[in-house]
Image (tube, rainbow, N blue to C red):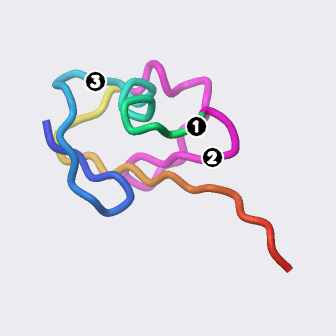
Amino acid sequence: MNVVINGKPRQVADGADLAAVLAEFGVPERGVAVAVDGAVVPRASWPGTELHPGATIEVLTAVQGG
């Protein structure tokens, strides 16, 4: 199925959950926040969060600066 990850269309397996998709694309398990269709998904819920065709996934990384 097709989803959008950080603005880029991606093909993932049908029925894939959020944890599997993030692992497939090399997203680290720590230091990131993830939202699906605009709603933040707690890390503990990644494995049980099923994705639907056309889902929009945003991966945000904390950045330090000054």
Query: Dot 2: within a 10 Å radius of its alpha carbon, few (fewer than 14), some, or many (20 or more) residues?
Result: few
> Is 12 situated left or right of 44 in this image?
left
Query: As drawn, which residue projects farthest toward the bottom?
Result: 66
Task: Give the left or right position of residue 37, taking residue 44 as reference.
Answer: left
Between marks 1 and 3 in the image, the one whose residue lies nearer the viewer: 1
Q: Earlier in the sequence, mark 1 or mark 3?
A: 3
Residue bearing the label numbered 1: 28
Q: In the structure shown, which secondary structural element does the residue marked by tag 3 occupy?
A: loop
Q: Inspect the magenta stretch and tell me whether residue 56 lies in it.
A: no
Location of residue 15 (image quadrant): top left
User: Residue 12: percent from the left, percent from the top?
Assistant: 21, 33
| Image quarter in which the C terminus is found | bottom right
- Total numbered circles: 3
Task: Kindly identify the amino acid type of the residue bearing the numbered disc 1.
Answer: Pro
Residue pointed to by mark 3: 16
* Quadrant housing the N terminus: top left
Q: CA distance from mark 1 to mark 3?
A: 18 Å
Q: Residue at x 19, y 47 (%)?
A: 54
Q: Is residue 36 depicted above or below 65 in this figure?
A: above
Q: Which residues are magenta?
A: 29-49
Query: Mark 3: which amino acid?
Result: Ala
Q: Nearer the viewer, mark 2 or mark 1?
A: 1
Q: Which residue is mark 2?
A: 32
Number of other residues with Cα within 10 Å of mark 3, as a class: few under 14, some 14 to 19, many 20 or more: some
Residues at marks 2 and 1 touching, judged by CB atoms closer than 8 Å: yes
User: Which residue type carries mark 2?
Assistant: Val
Q: Residue at x 61, y 32 (%)?
A: 29
Q: In x, y percent, where is residue 33?
A: 60, 47
